[in-house]
Image: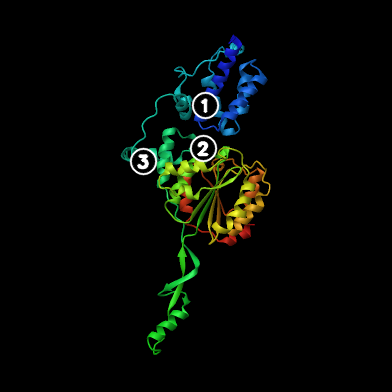
């Protein structure tokens, strides 16, 4: 093997290592991205460090909130001060902790990714988890509840998952079409009254009453698992597992480029087994998003079965659609007219200057009853409280 081939192999190995670090920090990077990065570097060339930076940036970064993480990881990994002069040699350094750089400048996820070679700690037992939760102070719990899922370290994510497992989603009971006997109901029960009169010999007519039965409505969840939602959708799955095992009549669907019903998989009491079954059933993790196509599939094959009896629908998505909202408004309108309440949970609402400018968001927004942020534990807990308040369907129709 000649010297040039050795240098090229070293460059490819370092790009792969750099991609693994970015993936460990939460960026959706797979083998395809690594191949694209190597080809891009070969096409652009290795003239200077700035071109090298923006070449990798163009391949690995596809969202604004990923730029800071990429910048920190790049400066930490490719930190050789003489890199610009030695780039043609392709002799790039290996990863090690830089003691001169303050740790405060590095995010927790990046520091953990750089130390990924250390042996994993044993998984805590149930007693250990209880001791950890008990040791957590009130201020620590409050910080964890308000912290964005995308900014959490691996340890904080594990603690957040335990907190999500305890969340409940109470939905108030609503009157159904069926009636039940009631001492002081609003409707006279003629059949029960006649039976009571016959038993008494007809001397006394004892009126019997009935009232509509109350029952919580079904809950239908449509959750986006595209690449832009990867960090949040995995946390939402823990929340949905807790809901599915706490109440009946919960239907859960995941969508990216296709629709997948995971209701049966989430019924497993063990969260690890349940999520393993979900991972095996879903084939479009962290891919593109075709919201309109997936909702059309839902309306055609599932809506009649799962939206009966005035279901409450949770639509979890950032609204970024690869098809530019084609047919999305029509499908959302059909869902809105078939359910009691349609709630849109969008992680992008965490930004103070957020505006629904994309075509997909503009198509969805007119048909939702409630538009809420969902990026941490506190917002999911607020959702549970908000579901007790039931706005009239006429409010949405007047707004439309």
Q: Quadrant of residue 92?
A: top right
Q: Residue 350's spot in the image, x, y percent?
A: 54, 41
At numbered mark 3, what does the secondary structure look like: helix, strand or loop? helix
Picture quarter with the N terminus: top right
Q: State the CA–CA distance, disc 2 to disc 1.
A: 16 Å
At numbered mark 1, what does the secondary structure look like: helix, strand or loop? helix
Residue behind mark 1: 20
Q: Residue 274's spot in the image, x, y percent?
A: 45, 44
Rendered view: 369 above or below 176: above
Rendered view: 9 above or below 305: above
Query: Most extreme residue toward the bottom, as rendered?
Result: 203
Q: State the CA–CA distance, disc 3 to disc 2.
A: 26 Å
Q: Nearer the viewer, mark 1 or mark 3?
A: 1
Q: Residue 236 versus residue 10: which sits nearer the camera?
A: 10
Q: Nearer the viewer, mark 3 or mark 2?
A: 2
At numbered mark 2, what does the secondary structure look like: helix, strand or loop? helix
Query: Most extreme residue toward the top, as rendered?
Result: 3
Tell me if label 1 and label 3 are in contact, CB under 8 Å.
Answer: no
Residue behind mark 2: 231
> Image check: 171 left or right of 74?
left
Q: Residue 87's spot in the image, x, y percent?
A: 60, 13
Residue behind mark 3: 138
Q: Earlier in the sequence, mark 3 or mark 2?
A: 3
Q: Residue at x 63, y 16 (%)?
A: 46
Confirm whether residue 336 shows in the render: yes
Q: Quadrant of residue 75?
A: top right
């Amino acid at each position: 093997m000649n010297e040039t081939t050795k240098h090229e192999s070293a460059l490819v190995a370092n790009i792969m290592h750099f991609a693994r670090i970015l993936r460990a920090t939460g960026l959706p990077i797979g083998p395809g991205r690594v191949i694209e990065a190597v080809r891009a570097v070969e096409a652009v060339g290795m003239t200077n460090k700035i071109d090298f930076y923006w070449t990798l940036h163009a391949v690995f970064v596809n969202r604004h909130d990923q730029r800071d993480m990429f910048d920190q990881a790049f400066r930490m990994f490719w930190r050789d001060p003489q890199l610009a002069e030695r780039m043609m040699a392709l002799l790039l350094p290996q990863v090690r902790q830089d003691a001169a750089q303050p740790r405060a400048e590095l995010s927790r996820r990046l520091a953990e990714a750089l130390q990924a070679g250390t042996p994993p700690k044993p998984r805590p037992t149930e007693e250990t988890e209880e001791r950890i939760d008990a040791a957590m102070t009130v201020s620590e719990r409050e910080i964890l509840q308000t912290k964005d899922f995308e900014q959490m370290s691996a340890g904080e994510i594990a603690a957040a998952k335990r907190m999500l497992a305890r969340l409940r989603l109470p939905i108030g009971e609503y009157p159904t079409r069926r009636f039940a006997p009631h001492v002081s109901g609003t409707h006279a029960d003629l059949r029960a009254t006649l039976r009571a009169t016959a038993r008494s010999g007809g001397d006394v007519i004892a009126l019997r009453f009935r009232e509509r039965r109350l029952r919580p409505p079904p809950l239908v969840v449509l959750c986006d698992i595209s690449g832009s939602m990867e960090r949040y959708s995995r946390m939402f799955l823990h929340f949905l597992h807790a809901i599915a095992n706490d109440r009946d009549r919960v239907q859960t669907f995941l969508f990216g480029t296709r629709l997948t019903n995971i209701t049966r998989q989430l019924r497993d009491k063990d969260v690890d087994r349940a999520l393993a079954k979900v991972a095996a059933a879903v084939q479009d993790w962290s891919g593109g998003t075709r919201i309109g196509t997936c909702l059309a599939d839902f309306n055609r094959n599932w809506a009649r079965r799962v939206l009966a009896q005035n279901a409450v629908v949770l639509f979890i998505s950032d609204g970024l659609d690869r098809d530019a909202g084609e047919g999305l408004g029509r499908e959302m309108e059909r869902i809105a007219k078939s359910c009691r309440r349609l709630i849109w949970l969008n992680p992008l609402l965490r930004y103070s200057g957020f505006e629904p400018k994309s075509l997909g968001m503009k198509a969805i927004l007119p048909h939702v009853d409630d538009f809420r942020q969902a990026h941490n534990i506190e917002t999911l807990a607020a959702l549970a409280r908000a579901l007790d308040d039931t706005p009239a369907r006429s409010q949405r129709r007047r707004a439309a």
